[in-house]
Each structure stands twice: as structure tokens, then as C-alpha cells.
Amino acid sequence: MNPTSSAARPTFVHDHPLRVYWEVTRACDLACRHCRATANPWADPGELTTLEGLRLLQRLATFGEPLPHIVLTGGDPLKRCDLLALVAAARALDFRVSVAPSATPLLTSDALLALKTAGIDAMSLSLDGSTVERHDAIRGISGTYGRTLEAARIANVLHVPFQVNTLVCADTVDDLPAIYERVKALGATRWSLFFLVTVGRGRVLEPVSAERAEQVLEWAAGLHGRPGEAAPIVTTTEAPQLRRVVMQGRRSRGDAELSARGNGHAHHAAGVRDGNGIMFISHTGDICPSGFLEIAAGNVRTDDVVEVYRSAPLFQQLRDVDGFQGRCGRCEYRSMCGGSRARAFGATGDPLAEDPLCEYEPEAGRL
């Protein structure tokens, strides 16, 4: 099948986001070198109130079935005193809820038990180094490595599934194989490789080159557990090129072999990207395509979040892959991949431009 055929183009997510990321606060006690939100220890007085948050959840429920998965992120969600109430309210509306806490002294066994009791489905942790020195250097605060490992241990005891997020940049890329082994040992269900987008404090870090990114994606596509060995599902954030790499492997090796190796999961997310299956609500209510593409198309205090997602010109432009520029617009894999719209915007000021992380030359460009 041609990767750009109509069968490969997701249309359902034009009406229903698969995931809604709600930045409940930008307050956080860490000083991570790559922080998108440029978080600080104090809450913004303009962040959504509890009542406004409850109204937001009620409105999101009108998307209808299947409801989007709500991810409560930050900053550090544990800095909000009403976090448990928000989780409970979301669960009462039948949302699946995940939480992305920071590895600070607030992340205790009691806090994790309270989150589980409130009804979270999963949580995420961050691990940016295979050793305490490497990880804490990225996080900016000593002790985060140990707290992350302890939180993973407690999550396993409580039977709370967790994802581990790992930054991919020049400082971490050579450590990825060792981090992967650590992630497996922790018992994570998923490992998400976050390819740096230079926004917020992330501007002080150096991204990997397009050539190195391709090598990492080829390596990640080949990761799978040995027979009888548990291994996390490997995904990417702001690097949808993994789907192309996996599909190229599918075409070259054959469906049967790829299925046997268990790495077809990357294709299941085909077409999902910033603004297309993904929506982000900022701490002050701005409605954006993603946390890394923080261009406001409306605000929940004044606009209907459902209608903004479905009809706002920005969201509609991001769904029209034929309107993408450069190699992304010519690429035969544009429907399933489409490149990082956030990175394109960060590099050029145009969210429809080509993604500079990718070195792939489309077949149409080879003629």
C-alpha cells in the first residue's frame, strides 16, 4: 500500500483527540536544562482554578466516545493541592487519566498511593542518564536519579504502569543503550524517546544531527525483548520519523517477520501529531496543538475547546499534510509521519515547514 493513500490518512482524530495534555501548573521544584515550560517553584496566579478545571473536564467529555486520554502534566502536577480532586473528577467522567510528576520530595509513596486510589491509569517518569551523575546533570538538582528509581519501585509495588521519558540530545545520545537497559530493569511498560525541541530552557542544549537521529531511530526500531524477556514498547516524542523507519523495515523484511519481532506498534500511531490527535491546554487555559507547539488557537476561558480542536484554522492546517512545505510536503510517508511541526516552527517560525531533524530524501525528490 502506498503510505500516502487515503487508507493511511487518519480522519477520526480530526474530530476526536486521542490525548489531551493539560498543563495543570508550571510550578516545579526542579531546574531541568531542557524544560519546555521554563518552570519555577511558584504557581502562576493566572493558572486555571479548580472550578475552571472541573468545567474544562466536563466540556472535554462532550467529545464523546471514545473519550480522549487525559494527561495531567506541568511543571509538577503534585504542586497543585487539588490534583487528587481533578483526577477523581476526570475518572467520574470516565476519562483515562495519567499523571507526569517530577522527581522531587513531593513524590512519596503516600502521594503515589493517593494517585492510585484517585484512579490514575498510569504515570510517567523521566530518566535522562544511566548513572546518577549523568541524570542529575540534566535535571539540575541532585537526588532526582535516586527518587526516580524509588518511584519506579513503588509504582511496581502498587501495580501502577509507568512510562519512562528520556531526552535525546547531544549530551544524552551516546548513553541511550545503557539507559534502555536501566529502563528494562525498572519494569517500565513504555519508553518514550523525546527528541529535543529547542523551546524554553531547551535552547541551551544541542540537538542531535539529522544523520545521528536517523541512526538512533533505526536502532530504536530494532529494539525488542528476547524470547521470554519483558521489554518496554519504544515510542518517540517529536520524532514521528520512527513510523517511516518502521514501515521501511516492514517493506524490506516483510510483514510476517516484522510482526514476529513485535515492533509494529510505531505504525499504530500513524498520522498522530501535534494538532492531529494531540491537543494541549496550558496552565492559563490556552488551547494549543501541543506543549512544544505552543501557539494558542483559543482559550478555554473564552472559547469552546471542542470547536477549537475541530475547526480552528491552525488545527486544520496541521491536518493537511499536502500543505506541508519542503521535503515533508513531498514525502511519500507524510500521512503517517508528517515530521515534528513543533521543531519546524522552532527552526523557521512556520509550523508547516519541513522538519530539520529528518535527513530522508522523498522518492519524488529523487526523480
Image: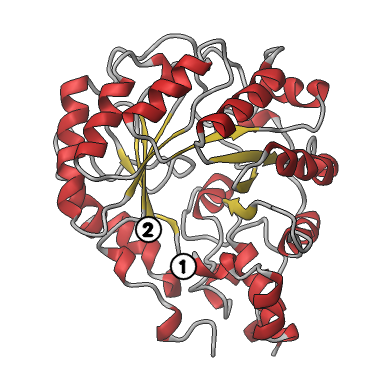
Q: Are marks 2 and 1 in contact (CB under 8 Å)?
A: yes
Please indicate, yes or no, whether residue 277 appears anywhere in the rendered image: yes
| Residue type at tag 1 | Gly
Q: From the top left corner, tell me how far across and down residue 34 is, in percent.
A: 63, 30
| Residue 71 figure quarter | top left
- Give the color scheme: rainbow, by chain, secondary structure or one colour: secondary structure
Secondary structure at badge 1 equals: loop
Residue at which label 1 appears: 271
Q: From the top left corner, tell me how far across and down residue 129 is, in percent.
A: 77, 32
Please indicate, yes or no, whether residue 26 appears anywhere in the rendered image: no
On-image quarter of the C terminus = bottom right
Q: From the top left corner, tell me how far across and down residue 16 is, in percent.
A: 27, 59
Q: Residue at x 38, y 42 (%)?
A: 295
Residue at which label 2 appears: 277
Q: Residue at x 55, y 53 (%)?
A: 344
Q: From the top left corner, tell me how far across and down residue 265 is, in percent.
A: 57, 65
| Residue type at tag 2 | Gly
- Rendered view: 52 above or below 11: above
Secondary structure at badge 2 equals: strand
- Rendered view: 91 above or below 216: above
Q: Residue at x 58, y 65 (%)?
A: 266
Q: Earlier in the sequence, mark 2 or mark 1?
A: 1
> Toward the viewer: 333 or 93?
93
